[in-house]
Amino acid sequence: FDMRREGADPMATADGGDVLYTGRHFFVGLSDRTNERGWEVLRSVFGSRLRREDVDDDDEVVVAVPPVIRGKSVLHLKSAVTHLDPHTLLAPEGPIGDVDLTAMKA
């Protein structure tokens, strides 16, 4: 996916290490490399494409995950959270995992 081809906001940024697709949701970690504008582009492009019958109507499909320790302890969302199978996310104990899993409603 090339945001430039989609006519996205030129200030939108999204780094692949901050985007985690589980087969049901896109989790987008906001960081120094992925900003809210980038998340908005991903949500507008993929939100309707990912709408599936196994996702509740009020359940967001493209979810923004707030930065935990921006640029210090966690380089990317995928540095802190791993997708193991369709129903399992692995995250560290403590503040980093707590914030991530709460934002992901996991």
Image (spheres, rainbow, N blue to C red):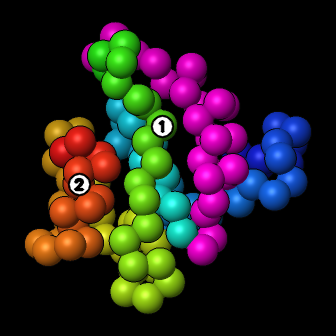
Q: Label 2: which residue?
A: 101
Residue 15 horizontal/vertical position (percent): 61, 64
Q: Label 1: which residue?
A: 62
Looking at the rendered structure, which numbered label has been put on residue 82? none
Q: Is residue 46 magenta?
A: yes
The segment highlighted magenta reads 32-54
Q: Is residue 8 left or right of residue 22?
A: right
Q: Quadrant of residue 69?
A: bottom left
| Disc 2, SS | helix
Residue 65 horizontal/vertical position (percent): 41, 54
Which amino acid type is shown beneath numbered disc 1? Val
22 is higher (above) or lower (below) than 18: above
Residue 38 horizontal/vertical position (percent): 67, 51
Residue 56 horizontal/vertical position (percent): 30, 16
Residue occupying the far bottom of the picture:
72
Q: Earlier in the sequence, mark 2 or mark 1?
A: 1
